[in-house]
């Protein structure tokens, strides 16, 4: 049966070929499947890298805040921010100088007229009327106008006021009026929290415009006390950051205790090491907000003391300081304590870097005599032959017999510093208590990259200092100065 042999050979060969074909298809399928799986894994990895995932911290006891509360919209950081120095020049104080700025009164009225949704004010105390000070002064009219306008707004939009808990004898008429008009008010008991006070003075309007400076919510701060501050318009990134400081006060008014650490929603990305970069008056600027005391600084926030020390350290030719009080002590502590952080820094840069240091300090009937002993010590670091140049002058606001009757008035209440690089506008006097346990804040502006024909904030503030320093109201402090001859007006 020879014919059967080829048949079986052909059948086996056919089966072998079919088997080989199926094997090839099988392995090709495996290769395709493996390739597809690899591609899928790569896509998933890319998705994990490129698409943010919810944080696991959302299950914590603190609710996760809206991202807009933590990180400002990066688009808004390109806002064409406009910054304006503002002053209160006391009635009767005149300068032979062209250096002038809008009044704080008009700036506050402008801010209220701009308001569309909210006004948040952090404040020390409220005495905007004659009734508050038991006076009959016509110049209280500006404070009364501010109070009345704010009361109007309180019935139409959100007005929130964080204020230091008033002492028993402090007037509360203004706060009652605003509360009855619809404002929301929280008192912050800093005495219980830190043994200090809420000494901050700033406004945030519509989370777009801000004011920060030395002026209290006091009619005298508008017409009888020399003040300096700054208003920044149309600057949502900066306003959002200042709002975080306000929200901390608002939180403390309700919680009655200081969290440690502060919840993430109070933290900031902007500080002395990583300032906010934005245009101010069309000028590239590095800006940040500092705060005190350190226990009120959330993650990322530069403390006010560290800000001052840093600004002094960064100076290359001069440091000009204008403050009401300057004391290297814990002024309100018991027992008294020496506190030399700022004093040592000024002496150090004067000696090591040959920086020119100028201090313009206020002198009035509430000045502590001990301050002059420390100022004379600082002023003794003056030796032109050895390139040591620290000078101190005292600024006296003159008063008529009638003006002398106004309580706690007729004083230079400024709280700023300007160097060859930086403008620093704050709310604190310069003694240890204000940086260790009292709440204050400051705006720090560096515009050294400016190529603009417009004057910088630093150059404007320098002009204000030099106007005051060279005025008839300023007197050099020497080792032989008899303070009673000119200081206690």
Image (spheres, rainbow, N blue to C red):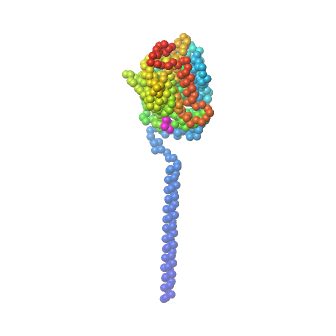
Q: Is residue 211 magenta?
A: no
Tell me if I can see residue 335 in this picture. yes
Q: Is residue 436 left or right of residue 102?
A: left
Question: Front-most of 489 and 134?
Answer: 489
Q: How many marks?
A: 0
User: Magenta part mainly helix, strand or loop?
Assistant: loop
Image coords of residue 334 (percent x, y): 38, 22
Which residue sits at x=49%, y=67%? 27
Residue farthest to the bottom, as pictured: 1
Residue at the top extreme, as displayed: 401
Which residue is located at x 49 percent, y 74 percent? 19
Q: Quadrant of residue 453?
A: top right
Compared with 33, 63 (above or below) is above
How far from the left and from the top, in percent, is residue 80? Answer: 61, 35
> Which residue is found at the position 54% from the left and 34% from the top?
446
Up the image or down, 368 lies above or below 262; here it is above
Residue range highlighted in magenta = 270-274
Left or right: residue 488 compared with residue 148:
left
- Residue at image location 51% in from the left, 29% down from the top: 318
**Of 456 and 108, which appears nearest the observer?**
456
> Percent position (x, y) of residue 304?
47, 30
Residue 309 visible in the displayed image? no
Q: How far across and down, in percent of the image, does residue 160 sit?
A: 54, 28
Q: Nearer the viewer, residue 283 or 471?
A: 471
Q: Nearer the viewer, residue 358 or 260?
A: 358
């Amino acid at each position: 049966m020879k014919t059967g042999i080829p048949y079986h050979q052909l059948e086996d060969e056919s089966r072998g070929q079919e088997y080989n074909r199926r094997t090839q298809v099988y392995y090709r399928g495996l290769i395709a499947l493996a390739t597809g799986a690899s591609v899928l894994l790569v896509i998933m990895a890319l998705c994990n890298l490129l698409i943010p995932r919810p944080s696991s911290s959302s299950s914590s006891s603190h609710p996760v805040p809206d991202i807009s509360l933590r990180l400002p919209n990066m688009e808004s950081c390109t806002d064409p921010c406009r910054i304006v120095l503002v002053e209160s020049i006391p009635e009767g104080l005149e300068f032979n100088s062209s250096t002038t700025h809008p009044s704080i009164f008009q700036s506050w009225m402008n801010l209220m007229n701009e308001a569309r949704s909210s006004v948040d004010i952090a404040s020390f105390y409220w005495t905007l009327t004659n009734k508050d000070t038991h006076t009959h002064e016509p110049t209280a009219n500006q404070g009364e106008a501010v109070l009345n306008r704010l009361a109007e707004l309180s019935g139409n939009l959100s007005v929130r006021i964080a204020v230091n808990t008033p002492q028993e004898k402090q007037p509360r008429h203004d706060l009652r009026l605003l509360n009855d008009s619809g404002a929301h008010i929280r008192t912050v008991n800093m005495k219980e929290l830190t043994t200090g006070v809420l000494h901050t003075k700033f406004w945030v309007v519509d989370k777009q415009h801000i004011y920060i400076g030395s002026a209290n919510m006091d009619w005298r701060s508008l017409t009888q006390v020399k003040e300096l501050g700054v208003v920044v318009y149309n600057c949502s990134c900066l306003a959002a950051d200042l709002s975080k400081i306000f929200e901390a006060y608002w939180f403390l008014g309700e919680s009655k205790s200081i969290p440690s650490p502060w919840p993430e929603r109070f933290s900031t990305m902007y500080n002395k090491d990583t300032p906010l970069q934005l245009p101010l008056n069309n000028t590239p600027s590095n800006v940040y907000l500092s705060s005190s005391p350190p226990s009120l600084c959330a993650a990322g926030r530069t403390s006010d003391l560290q800000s001052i020390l840093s600004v002094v350290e960064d100076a290359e030719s001069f440091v000009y300081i204008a403050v009401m009080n300057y004391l290297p002590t814990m002024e309100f502590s018991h027992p008294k304590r020496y506190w030399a952080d700022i004093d040592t820094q000024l002496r150090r840069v004067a000696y090591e870097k040959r920086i020119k240091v100028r201090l313009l300090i206020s002198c009035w009937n509430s000045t502590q005599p001990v301050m002059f002993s420390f100022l004379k010590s600082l002023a003794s670091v003056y030796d032109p032959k050895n390139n040591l140049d620290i000078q101190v002058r005292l600024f006296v606001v003159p008063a008529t017999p009638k003006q002398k009757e106004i309580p706690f008035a007729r004083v230079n209440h400024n709280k700023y510093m300007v160097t060859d690089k930086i403008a620093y506008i704050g709310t604190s006097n310069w003694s240890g208590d204000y940086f260790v346990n009292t709440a204050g804040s400051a705006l720090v502006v560096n515009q050294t990259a400016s190529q603009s024909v417009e004057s910088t904030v630093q150059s404007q503030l320098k002009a204000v200092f030099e106007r005051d320093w060279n005025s008839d109201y300023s007197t050099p402090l020497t080792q032989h100065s008899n303070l009673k001859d000119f200081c206690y007006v």
